[in-house]
Image: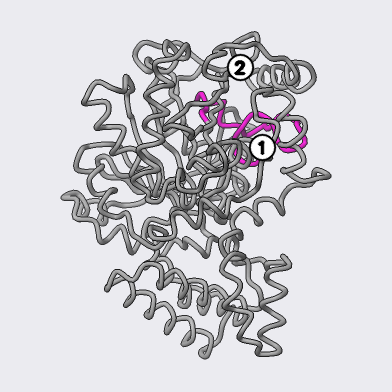
Amino acid sequence: MELLRSVVALLLLLCCGALFVLRSTDAAGGGGGTPDGSEQWGYVEIRPKAHMFWWLYRSPQRVENGSTPWPTVLWLQGGPGASGVGYGNFMEIGPLDTNLKPRASTWLAKADLLFVDNPVGTGFSFVEGGNRTLLAHTDGEAARDLTTLLCKLYRRNTRPRLQGSPLYIVAESYGGKFAVTTALSALKAIHAGRLAANLAGVALGNSWISPEDSVLSWGPLLYQVSRVDENGLGRCDRLAKQISAQLETTEFEEAEKSWNDLENAVLEEANSIDFYNFLKDDLSEDAAVVAAAAVQRQRSLASSSLGKSRRRYSSYLSSKVTREGGLSGLMNTVIKDKLRIIPKNLSWGEQSDDVFEALAGDFMKPRIHEVDELLKLRVNVTIYSGQLDLICATKGTLDWVQKLKWDGLKNFTSSRRVPLYCNNGGEAAAAAAAAAGTQAFLKSYKNLKFYWILGAGHMVPIDNPCPALKMLSDITQSPAR
């Protein structure tokens, strides 16, 4: 309780006063921060005329312990094109929620947090003149850009804090593809002496690592939870197998179009199911359009809805914002005023269609090989999956794990998984944890861990924050006060 009170007190101070205070820390690089050093932010020109925005929080619970250094978490959002500085920070794990109230489950309790708007063109990151040719067009290019940011950031005045802190890359959704490609790119930079960092691990949350395995899981899962009948199952499976065949022949952009057709079919057959929590309905206007098309059989509507499918991830996150004006209103007023370095003509957006379209050729490509490479290099890899997710369903994730060529896979598969409870200490907490029941399961072998997070959909830190925070503590071995 004393720990919680100290966190709340500091965050209330941030919310009420320090939120609007700025101290220039790197005028040449367009940076700033709070006077006490608890926050720093800025831009890095990763390529000529391409500028990536970052925001670093120092934890008030930081413990200086030589044997177990305090960790830093680099959070990577999905989309691609959704803002980590906005969504990950204010909606999932940062110190304040979208109403600028302290978040009890902030991951700052266990680590320093680094948010970036990645790839460039996302959120507050931008390319000069809106030149789309300057955007990243492959996952590999996005990884190199992010590695460039890390190299420059670790050389700046944040260096003493960052260099002594083990770095964990934690990702959600499409961010998982960025995480594994960036981790491999960062390792090369570390070995070449360009990046003075200690990459301690990668965590992939409900990640779009294997689009093929994800879409093949949709029909069977929907059938098992009574959202489609035999006809719906057959329709979903036919489209999923079509996607699989297109991926086999490397028709990646055609596969993306078929993915869009499959999403529309799922919305029709499952009566506008929510792709991020299959116990709920998608109440967005996009889903209503598809439902109307199902009734009227106006198939022409499906071909024009690819952009809507691309924005569904950010739209789902935005639907959870209770603040008037939404997250966009917050980011373009209070937060922009606080940061003071955002170009006046730049508006924060919930999803960058330009970024998504630039990565169209890579969207359906798998990144299983990259996970394999990290395991072989003995990098700690954690995979976590929300029980109620559809778009990156647990079954699909387990299926792509079985495609790994890692020599520890057989022993991992045969390992016994253990139940996890949320118990933060004390008799009252233990009693509450027992009453809440099992919150997660964990299976691990050597440098691979897999967490099943119960009661959570695609956004695990939002849906079930307690086991998510416990998982982070287990992964990073954060020293306790």
**Relative horizontal placement of residue 408, taking residue 301 as reference (left or right):** left
Q: Which mark is residue 346?
A: 1
Q: Where is residue 323 in the image (x, y as percent from the top left)?
A: 80, 43
Residue 105 counted in the magenta span: yes
Spatial CA distance of label 2 from label 1 is: 18 Å
Judged from the image, the secondary structure of the residue bearing numbered disc 1 is loop
Bounds of the magenta segment? 91-114
Label 2 sits on residue: 32
**Residue 307 is covered by the magenta coloring:** no
Residue 424 at x, y = what percent? 56, 31
Q: Residue 452 carries which label?
A: none
Camera-side residue of 266 and 279 = 266
**Does the image show residue 438?**
yes
Q: Is the magenta stretch mostly helix, strand or loop?
A: loop
Residue at the image position 40 percent from the left and 51 percent from the top: 137
Q: Which residue is drawn at 57% across and 22% down?
A: 41
Taking the image as shown, residue 15 lies to the left or right of residue 405, namely: right
